[in-house]
Image: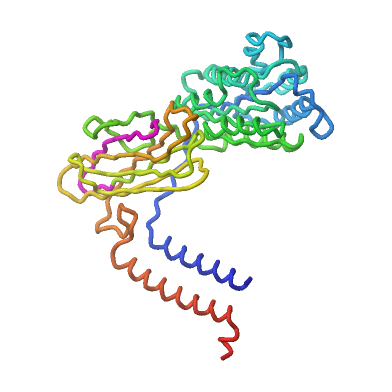
Amino acid sequence: MIIGRRSAAVLCGLLAALTVGALPTSAAAEPVKQETPPKVELVLDVSGSMRARDVGGQSRMAAAQQAFKEVIDAVPDEVRLGIRTLGANYRGEDKRRGCVDSEQLYPVGKVDKTEAKAAVATLRPTGWTPIGYALRQAVKDLRNGDGHGDGDRDGTRRIVLITDGEDSCGLPDPCDVARELAADGTHLTVDTLGLASDAKVREQLSCIAEATGGTYTAVQDTGQLSDRLQQLVRRSVDTPVVVPTVVEGSQDRCADAPLLQPGLYGDRQKFGEHGWFRVELEPGQELRASASVLADRAVDRDYGVLVRAVTEKGQELARGSGAGHGRTDVMSAGLRYPWTGEEERTVCVEVSHSFSAPASVKRTPGLPVELNVDVVAAPDSVPDVAAFGLARGWVPLVLLAVTGLVAGVLWGWLGRLRNPVRRAS
């Protein structure tokens, strides 16, 4: 059985290599140089529950303070760092006051390490857990920090939330706030670190992170907390910035659709909606379009994405589709369409998806859609890969014949290994 499994793996690898060899590859995109320094705001929970002593024998607050000290010492020079607290000041029972208890402990900018560490060292577990409110305030900090309020869309912006509990205020709902941030069209990511292994905490922190393309990490000890914080701060430097242009596709027809140039675009589509866009092609040009739909909330198990290229009169020119089953964060599909005519042609691009959700899931805003449009020189002859994603031409036929021959030989060899009696006879 071991030999059989290894042989099957070899067969799959060979078939995959032959298939990939039949497909053309595109050049990798060049990283986008950041004009604006990357900004990171650490949002620390200082609520009363942070007194619990279950992180390596010390309190959650002490573990966070130790990790912050190490992170501040390791902040890259090019990062503009800020620190915000939630639940650090009001210890009373008035919910109205407790749910706006969030302040900026250290402003976003170049870090004076001594001053920043001294500010964190004074914190003591105190009050409520207004996560949604704190996230909204953190966004304002990032917009105003370091004198780049109008240029924050040009650089990486990251919020790192460290907490041991779920929001204790209810409104604004942290997941809804995260979706609002994603809908803004700015390059903002929220990562969450959980200091408690509670299922509700994990669900809420995962929701916040997934809505903005961030990550959720369940922290087990101080060392892991420190390492993860440093990774996320460093990631703001290493991650190239590609900010989609916000666009709204027409829901009815191509004639009213926005005309797109090559580039990356962001839209929102509610369940059941279709988005229409237009692209102009010159003779000898090829359209390459792909769309990705982000499942930023709970969705049903079956889903798909469809991208179509059609003429202004509705004749389909090409299509690409993707489908899946089970949990997913994103689903993508793409197409290619070469234009070999003699006059300029308007191509209508339709993007739709079949995501659905339980009745309890909010419908607005719609799911994030990212559309990438590229126009390149069409090949001199009919391409070996059609826009429908199906191979065509004599080269794929030869490859398929060779693949069948190799697969037959390997299958026969595999059968003889599994049945030594037949081989001996």
* Residue 312: quadrant of the picture: top left
Q: Is residue 269 magenta?
A: yes
Please tell me whether the stretch drawn in magenta is mainly helix, strand or loop.
strand
Looking at the picture, how far across and down is residue 314, in whole percent? 20, 42
Q: What residue appears at the point 64 percent right and 23 percent down from the top-left corner?
A: 43
- Let me know if residue 130 appears in the view: yes
* Residue 403: quadrant of the picture: bottom left
Look at the picture and state if 345 lies above or below 55: below
Q: Nearer the viewer, residue 13 or 155?
A: 13
Q: Is residue 274 magenta?
A: yes
Q: How many marks?
A: 0
Quick one: which residue is furthest to the front in this view?
A: 359
Q: Is residue 242 left or right of residue 378?
A: right
- Let me know if residue 35 appears in the view: no
Q: Nearer the viewer, residue 129 or 84?
A: 129
Look at the picture and state if 33 lies above or below 149: below
Q: Is residue 353 left or right of residue 105?
A: left
Q: What residue appears at the point 59 percent right and 17 percent down from the top-left corner?
A: 133
Q: Is residue 289 left or right of residue 225?
A: left
Looking at the picture, how far across and down is residue 352, in whole percent? 35, 39
Quadrant containing the C terminus in the rendered view: bottom right
Q: Is residue 305 left or right of residue 300?
A: left
Quadrant containing the N terminus in the rendered view: bottom right
Q: Which residues are magenta?
A: 267-286
Looking at the picture, how far across and down is residue 345, in whole percent? 19, 42
Looking at the picture, how far across and down is residue 107, in whole percent? 63, 17
Q: Nearer the viewer, residue 299 or 192?
A: 299
Q: Nearer the viewer, residue 224 or 178?
A: 178
Q: What residue appears at the point 43 percent right and 43 percent down from the top-left corner?
A: 303
